[in-house]
Image (cartoon, helix red, strand yellow):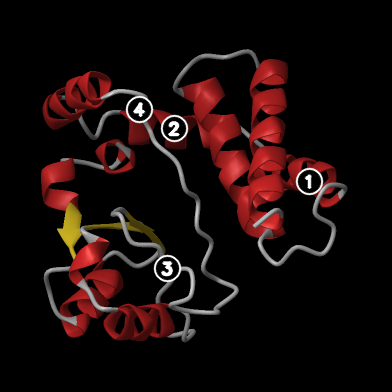
């Protein structure tokens, strides 16, 4: 679903059925863009650890890596840059199938709308507002800034894609951040 914002998800979503070098090259190609990788189960813990180490090494590219699969990165790596969010996008298989078919046909149109909306905002001020609120919940949490960025994206998506009123969109983004912090802190 997340990949469909940027383009054809069948093209953009890669697989762990590849080499570490190939993934590194993909991350370089998509510098400063999200990289989507499915089937995390295909790699052994040692390979996953090498991948996480590579992504957290501070090389010249910066990506958000979004993975899916039944295997978790917990225990594979202790990097603070790794944040795991567990959950289901859909409550039943029929909704997931419907969304999958829809995203294969209609993709790449939301990204430009989102970017145009973001250009109208004071991003730094919006981020700081969310960060200050979330800091009260998870004051010294290592993922606080990452969660604030996720919430900022949610805030903007609610306004620019789903046409929600600003106050309501902000409240929902704040609530998402609190839920993420509580889930992460509670583990």
Mark toward the start of the polypeptide (3 vs 1) = 3
Q: In which quarter of the image is residue 34?
A: bottom left
Question: Which quarter shows the N terminus?
Answer: top left
Query: Residue at point 39% right, 28% down?
Result: 113
Q: Mark 1 points at which residue?
A: 134
Q: Mark 3 points at which residue?
A: 73
Give percent across and percent down for residue 19. Answer: 15, 80
The image's mark for residue 90 is 4
Query: Residue at point 34% right, 86% down?
Result: 50
Q: Quadrant of residue 64?
A: bottom left
Mark toward the start of the polypeptide (3 vs 4) = 3
Q: In the orientation shown, which residue stands out farthest toward the right?
A: 136
Give percent across and percent down for residue 147. Answer: 63, 51
Given contact means CB atoms under 8 Å apart, are the residues at marks 2 and 3 in contact?
A: no
Given contact means CB atoms under 8 Å apart, are the residues at marks 1 and 4 in contact?
A: no
Give percent across and percent down for residue 181. Answer: 69, 49
Classed neighbour count for the residue bearing mark 4: other residues with Cα under 10 Å, few (<14), some (14–19), many (≥20): few
Circle 3 SS class:
loop
Mark toward the start of the polypeptide (1 vs 2) = 2
């Amino acid at each position: 679903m997340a990949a469909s914002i940027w383009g054809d998800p069948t093209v953009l979503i890669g697989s762990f059925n590849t080499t570490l070098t190939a993934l590194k090259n993909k991350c370089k190609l998509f510098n400063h863009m999200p990289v989507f990788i499915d089937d995390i189960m295909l790699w052994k813990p040692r390979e996953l650890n090498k991948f996480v180490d590579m992504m957290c090494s501070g090389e010249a590219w910066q990506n958000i890596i979004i993975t899916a699969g039944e295997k978790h990165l917990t225990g594979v790596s202790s990097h603070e840059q790794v944040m795991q969010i567990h959950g289901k996008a859909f409550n039943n298989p029929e909704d997931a199938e419907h969304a999958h078919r829809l995203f294969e046909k209609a993709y790449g149109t939301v990204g430009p709308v989102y970017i145009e909306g973001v250009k109208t905002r004071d991003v730094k001020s919006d981020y700081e507002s969310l960060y200050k609120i979330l800091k009260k919940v998870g004051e010294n949490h290592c993922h606080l800034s990452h969660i604030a960025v996720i919430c900022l994206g949610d805030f903007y998506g609610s306004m620019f894609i789903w046409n929600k009123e600003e106050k309501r969109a902000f409240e929902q983004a704040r609530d998402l951040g609190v839920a993420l912090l509580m889930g992460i802190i509670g583990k």
